[in-house]
Image (cartoon, helix red, strand yellow):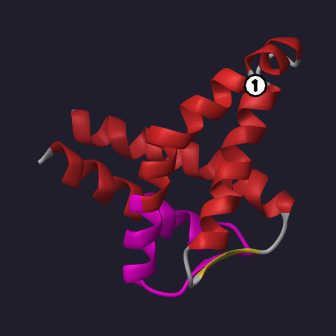
Amino acid sequence: MKLIVKVTINVFALLIVAYIVPGFSLDSLWTAVVAAVIIGVVNTFLRPIIQIIALPITLLTFGIAAFLINVALLWLVSLIVPGFTITNFTTAIIASVVLSLVSWFLNKMVKE
C-alpha cells in the first residue's frame, strides 16, 4: 500500500512539473506512471551507487555534485521513457528542483 501511495505522489508531482516547467513534457497519464516507476527504480538502485562513487567530488563541491547527479538521472529517465521529454539541461535543472519541492510538499500532505 505504501508503494502505491509513493508512486501516486510521484505521478502527481511529475504532472505538476510538466504543467509548470516549459520544456518538460509528458504525453499522457500512462507516460507519467511509467516515468514515476522508472524514476523510483533508478533512485533506489542506481543513484546510491553513483553517489558513493562520486562521494569525493561531492565533498569537494559541497553537495553540488549530488544535485547534478539527480539532474542527470532525471534526464536519463527522460531518454528511456517514450513520451517523456526534457528539452535541455537547464530545463532538467529547473525540473529537478521543482520536482523535489512538489514531491516534498505532497509527501508532507499525505503524512498529516
Residue 108 location, quadrant: top left
Which residue is painted at 87% across and 19% down in the image? 61
Task: Name above or below for residue 61 compared with residue 22.
Answer: above
Q: Of all residues shown, which one is farthest toward the left?
A: 1
Q: Is 106 on the left-hand or right-hand side of 48?
A: left
Q: Secondary structure at mark 1?
A: loop
In this picture, is 103 found above or below 22? above
Q: Looking at the picture, how far across and down is residue 9, in whole percent?
A: 34, 54
Which part of the image, by quadrant, shows the C terminus? top left
Residue at position x 71%, y 25% from top?
53
Q: Which residues are magenta?
A: 13-37
| Residue identifier under label 1 | 54
In the foreground, 89 or 19:
89
- Percent position of residue 107, x then y: 35, 40
* Snapshot quadrant of residue 97: top right
Check residue 14 for magenta coloring: yes
Residue 45 position within the rendered picture, expressed as x and y whole percent measured from the top left: 47, 40
